């Protein structure tokens, strides 16, 4: 325990000494500008939060049918059908930065962008999709999305330390999914939805521009589950879900 306290004390002294080193400051008047612009390149991952009917018969709209499943197991009122995300699939986000100075420590940021991503759903029952290239059992069901992102965020910045400045960011966002969907999709999501966003970031003042590295989570508000497919598809993949909410995790690089 004594060695641990000594190590922490030495680390604190090292950080404090490093912080006091005077370096040549870049972009000394950057934060005094009332309005400035930039662009964003980011990596995202899309996720879902599920709330299921357990069993599926708790859904008053569920009607069991004979689908002649290859495995011979038909879904009835007492069965539990459970969906989950198979894996996190990296996506791409590009956008524009518009930042308005509110004060020494606060900015208002509008960050419209375009996000491309994918969610892969797996179930505890076999997946059959008539839209798949093969009518055989599918490993997962893919939902591809193209979002128009419209976040309006407040940025709280710490005091500048030489050419570095950590910050927090939070606020609401609205997303519109413009990807193509059809009535035969096993699981459909609504096009628009509100999100609450929060994240942390680090401003680095370089010689000619400011680079901000930011990690942000966006939690969807409300149920984005749309109606199930038509009678040509097995409808229990949607009927098993009571509520579906969207999550988005984003690692952004802002160039301003």
Image (cartoon, rainbow, N blue to C red):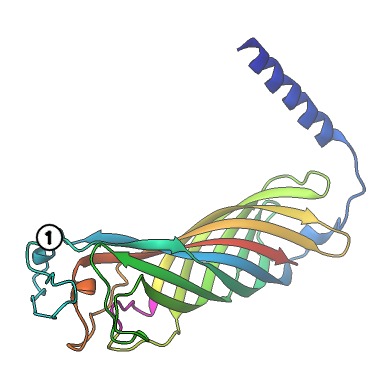
Compared across the picture, whether 55 is left or right of 255 comes to left
Q: Position of residue 112 (x, y in %)?
A: 58, 75
Q: Position of residue 25 (x, y in %)?
A: 89, 50
- For image coordinates 77% across by 31% down, the residue present is 15
- For image coordinates 29% across by 84% down, the residue present is 135
Nearer to me, 36 or 76: 76
Q: Which residue is mark 1?
A: 55
Q: Position of residue 86 (x, y in %)?
A: 39, 62
Q: Find the residue positioned furthest to the right.
A: 24
Q: Is residue 241 magenta?
A: no
Q: Position of residue 244 (x, y in %)?
A: 30, 66
**Where is residue 75, by image quadrant?**
bottom left
In the image, is residue 78 above or below residue 97?
Answer: above
Residue span colored magenta: 185-192
User: Most prominent secondary structure in the magenta stretch?
Assistant: loop
> From where the camera sits, is residue 154 visible?
yes
């Amino acid at each position: 325990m004594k060695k641990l306290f000594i190590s922490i004390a030495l680390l604190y002294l090292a950080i404090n000494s490093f912080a006091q080193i005077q370096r040549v400051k870049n972009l000394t008047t950057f934060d005094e500008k009332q309005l400035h612009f930039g662009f964003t390149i980011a990596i995202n991952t899309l996720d879902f939060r599920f709330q299921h009917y357990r069993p599926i018969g708790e859904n008053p709209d569920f009607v069991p049918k004979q689908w002649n499943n290859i495995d011979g197991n038909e879904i009835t009122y007492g069965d539990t059908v459970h969906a989950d995300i198979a894996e996190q699939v990296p996506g791409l986000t590009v956008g524009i930065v518009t930042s308005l100075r509110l004060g020494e420590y606060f900015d208002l940021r509008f960050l419209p962008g375009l996000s491309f991503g994918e969610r892969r759903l797996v179930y505890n029952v076999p997946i059959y999709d008539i839209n798949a290239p093969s009518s055989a059992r599918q490993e997962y069901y893919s939902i591809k999305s193209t979002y128009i992102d419209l976040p309006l965020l407040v940025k709280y910045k710490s005091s500048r330390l030489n050419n570095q400045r950590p910050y927090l960011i939070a606020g609401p966002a609205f997303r519109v999914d413009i990807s193509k969907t059809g009535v035969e999709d096993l699981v459909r999501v609504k096009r628009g939805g509100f999100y609450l966003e929060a994240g942390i970031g680090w401003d680095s003042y370089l010689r000619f521009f400011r680079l901000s590295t930011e990690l942000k989570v966006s939690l969807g508000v409300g149920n984005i589950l749309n109606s199930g497919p038509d009678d040509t598809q097995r409808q229990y993949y949607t009927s098993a879900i009571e509520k579906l909410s969207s999550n988005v995790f984003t690692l952004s690089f802002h160039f301003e």
